[in-house]
Structure formats: C-alpha cells, structure tokens
Image: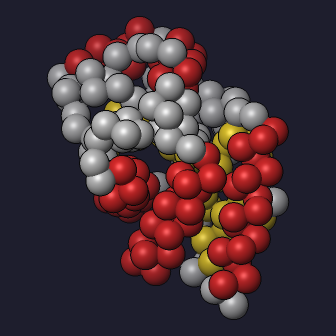
Amino acid sequence: MEIVLHSVKIETVQGDITRQPDLDVVVNAANAQLAPGGGVAGAIHQAAGRELYEACKILAPIKPGEAVITKAFQLPNQFVVHCLGPVYGKDSPEAELLASCYRNSLQLCEENGLKSIGFPAISTGIFGYPVREAVKVVFRSLAENLSETEKIKRIKFVLFSREDLEVYDREMTRYAEATK
C-alpha cells in the first residue's frame, strides 16, 4: 500500500529489512547494547557484517526512545539507524518512548541529508508491544513530525509477517482518510 503525505511517500511491504537496496537507511530495532541478538537486530548485524557491531560498541548503551546512526557496511544501504524501543509493560510511558524512536530516527535522517528510510515494526517482537497499539503510535508520530521534514521523501514500513502488514495497511488507510 502507498500514500503521500506532506510530500512524503509512505508505503508498506512484507519483506526482509536487510534486503532494501532502494533505501538510504534502514532502522534496527536494537537492544540497549546495540549488540547482535534475535529478530531484526540479529538479521541486520548478520547481513551487515562484524564491522557493524564494532561501530556500535562505542555508541552503546542507549536508552528506550533513543536513536544513533552508523554506516551500513555490507547492507545495501548507506546507513543504519539503531533505536531502542520500549519493552511493553516495563518501560513507561510506552507510547511516548515508541514515538521517540520514530521522531529521533527521522531527525537523524534529516541531519544526514537522507531521503529514504525503512522501518521494521519496532518493539512488537520480543519486546511485546501489541501491533495494533504500536501502529497507532507510529502514525500519530508521523502526523506530528512529517511536516517538519524537508529532506525525507520516502518512508517504507518493511514488515515481516502478513498479519503485521494488514494491520499497518488498515491504520495507514485510516490515517490517510483522517488527513484529507
């Protein structure tokens, strides 16, 4: 699915975040130590190579809602933004921390002159954030921050499961209708 808001093309796809050569930057749903792990973080570190963790070590630890940027090394992108989403039921306020992940990621793109970014479903895996709740935070954060972006022209949500894609598509449709 695809919409355009504030001159930014927003799209959703089902796929692998490590295989998005059409994007300047991809977002890693990182852990506090920016170390390889499971899920998105494990896949990104494996695809990028050992140099990614070496670059991450000096930036760690980060707190929930924070984001940092590194080169992408062997990924087909220029950069990786690493952000730590909240653990649902533990890190509070969850919605504010999750929104900070998106806001801070967009800000890093702006600061680095990047035009396109790919996001996974941050915090919805092992961190337990319910997808339906998380996606509402995502689009609310976009509504609050997209008007301030100048360089970003494309946002792609790369979702691992078909179910997540359907939830994102429904919310994006609601969001697009509400902003008409």
Q: Quadrant of residue 59?
A: top left
- The x and y percentages for residue 53 are 34, 15
Q: For the point 28% across and 48% down, which residue is it?
A: 92
Q: Is residue 144 above or below residue 115?
A: below
Colour pattern: secondary structure
Q: Is residue 11 left or right of residue 115?
A: right
Q: Is residue 8 above or below residue 98?
A: below
- The x and y percentages for residue 145 are 42, 72
Q: Quadrant of residue 113?
A: bottom left
| Residue 17 shows up from this direction | yes
Q: Is residue 148 above or below residue 55?
A: below
Q: Is residue 64 left or right of residue 174?
A: left
Q: For the point 41% across and 9% down, which residue is it?
A: 50
Q: Is residue 61 left or right of residue 123?
A: left
Q: Quadrant of the C terminus?
A: bottom right
What is the residue that sits farthest to the top in this orientation?
50
Q: Quadrant of the N terminus?
A: bottom right
Q: Nearer the viewer, residue 68 or 92?
A: 92
| Residue 78 shows up from this direction | no
What is the residue that sits farthest to the front in this orientation?
89
- The x and y percentages for residue 143 are 50, 75
Q: For the point 22% across and 34% down, which residue is it?
A: 62
Q: Is residue 166 above or below residue 129?
A: below
- The x and y percentages for residue 159 are 69, 40
Q: For the point 54% across and 38% down, which residue is it?
A: 124
